[in-house]
Amino acid sequence: MAHIMIIGAGIGGLTTALCLHARGLEVEIYEATSEIAPLGVGINLLPHACQILDELHLLDVLLADGIETQELIFFNKFGQQIWQEPRGIAAGYPWPQISIHRGNLQMSLLAQVEQRIGQDRIHTGMVLQCVVGDGDVARATFKPKQGDVLEIEASGIIAADGIHSTARAQFYPDEGMPLWNGAVMWRGLMETEPFLTGRSMFMAGHQEQKFVAYPVGQSEFEQGRSLTNWIAELRFPITDLLEREDWNRAGNFAAFTEQFSSWEFPWLSIGQLIEDAQTCYEFPMVDRDPIERWSFGRVTLLGDAAHPMYPIGSNGASQAILDAAAITRALVSVGGGADGIVAAFEHYQAERQPATAAVVRANRGNGPEQVMQLAEQRAPHGFTDINDILPLAERSQIAARYKQLAGFSKEALSQAK
Ligand SMILES: Cc1cc2nc3c(=O)[nH]c(=O)nc-3n(C[C@H](O)[C@H](O)[C@H](O)COP(=O)(O)OP(=O)(O)OC[C@H]3O[C@@H](n4cnc5c(N)ncnc54)[C@H](O)[C@@H]3O)c2cc1C
C-alpha cells in the first residue's frame, strides 16, 4: 500500500489525511508550526464539503460547535434587501451549510486525526524546504525548528502548505507574491445580540465598501446570543503588495471605523458593532492566477497551495475539502499502490484543476455578490423596488450560476445523496 506524505496540517491537509486513512492508505503529516493552535476567525463549509465531512462521520462534532446557516441575504449600503435565499438544509439540500470558527474546525479535524490515525503520525515544527517527485520514490527535505535538516521518503507527497506554498514556489519560481485586488478586509469575532434569524449570514454594500456578518457559535446561539464573525472591507488604489499578508496581523480600527459609522440597519448597528470590537485582523484580498499543472510526478498540490482564491462565495475551505475527496478517489481507483501514484495525481489534477480555476475566476467577478455591485451601479442612491433595477430572473440566474460553477447546485447534491 502507498505511503502518502501530507505537508501542512491546515483544513486541506487534515481532511486529506482523514479521507485517505478511511480508505486504508498510510499517511503521515508534516506541519511547519511547532504547535497547532486554533487560529483565524469565521469560515464556511458549503453543503458539498459537508457531504464529505458526513462520510467521515464528522458532522455531529462540527454542528455542536458551529452554526447551521439558515439564510444568506445581500443588502445595499442603505440596508435595502437585494437578494435572500435559504441555505443548506433550509434550502432543501441533503447537507447543511456550517459557519464555524476556523481554529475550532482545525482543532476538531486534528483531534480526529490523532484519534483515528495516531498522534505519532503528525510531525510539527517541520518546515518544508523542497520536494522531489521524479524518481521511484518521492522525497521531501525539512528544516526542523530544532535539529538538523532531514530528508524523508514516501510513495507520494501532497503539498497542502497554503497560499505561500513552498512546493508551489519550487515548481513556479517566478510567481512571486499573491495578487492583490486593492481590497482590505478587517475581520473580527465578538459576542453580540443575535440579528435577523440568529442563523443568518448577510452582506451589505458593494465592491468598494462592504460589510459581512454571520454567527459561528452554537453554544452562544443556544444562550440567545451570537458569536458574530464580521468583516469590514474597503477598496484602495492597487499597488504592489508590499507586505506579505498574514491571517494574524492586528488591524488598525482608525483605517475603517469612520467609513462605517453611519451604517445603521434596523437589525444591526454596524457603527456600534465596530466601536464595541476590541480586536480585529487585517488581511488584503489576494489570490493567484490559476496554474495548469499541480502534479509533478509523485508530488502534487492541494487546497490553497493549488488554487488560492478570494474569500468570496464561502469556497476556500470547501474547495480544499473537495480536493481531499478527489485525490482519495484517484488513489483508490489505481488500487492504492505506490506504482499508481503518478497516474492518480494526474487524474486528480484533471478533475480538480478546471473546476477550481473556474471558481478563482468567478470570485474575481464578485461571485454571487455580483448582485450587490449591479445594484450599486444601477441605483447608487437606493431603490423603491428592487425589481425595477434588478429583475428577479437576473438575480436568480447569478445565484444559480455560481452554485453550479462551484459544484453545489441542489440538483447535483440531491443526486449524490
Ligand atoms: C493561521 C491561519 C488562519 C486562517 N484564518 C482564516 C480565517 O479566519 N478565515 C478564512 O476564511 N480562512 C482562513 N485561513 C485560510 C483557510 O484556512 C484556507 O483558505 C482554506 O481552509 C484552505 O486550507 P488549506 O489547508 O489549503 O490552507 P491552510 O488552512 O492555510 O493550511 C496550510 C498549512 O500549511 C502549513 N505550512 C505552510 N508552509 C509550510 C511549510 N513550508 N512546511 C510545512 N507546513 C507548512 C501552515 O502552517 C498551515 O497549517 C487561515 C489560514 C491560516 C494558516
Image (cartoon, rainbow, N blue to C red):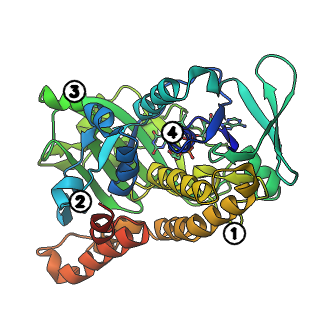
Q: Disc 4 vs disc 1: Cβ atoms closer than 8 Å? A: no
**Badge 1 local density, few (<14 within 10 Å), some, or many (20+)?**
few
Read off the residue under disc 3.
219
User: Which residue is pictured at 23% across the width and 79% down the height?
Assistant: 390
Question: What residue is pinned by disc 1?
Answer: 292
In the rendered image, which residue does mark 4 sit on?
Answer: 18
Q: Residues within 10 Å of mark 3 (few under 14, many from 20)?
A: some
Q: CA distance from mark 2 to mark 4?
A: 24 Å
Q: Find disc 2 in the rendering and name its residue.
A: 93
Left or right? Give the position of 193 relative to 304.
Answer: left
Q: CA distance from mark 3 to mark 1?
A: 43 Å
View extreme (top): residue? 146
Question: Which one is earlier in the sequence, the residue at label 2 or at label 4?
Answer: 4
Q: Quadrant of the C terminus?
A: bottom left
The answer to whether residue 141 is seen in the rendering is yes
Nearest-to-viewer mark from 1 and 2: 2
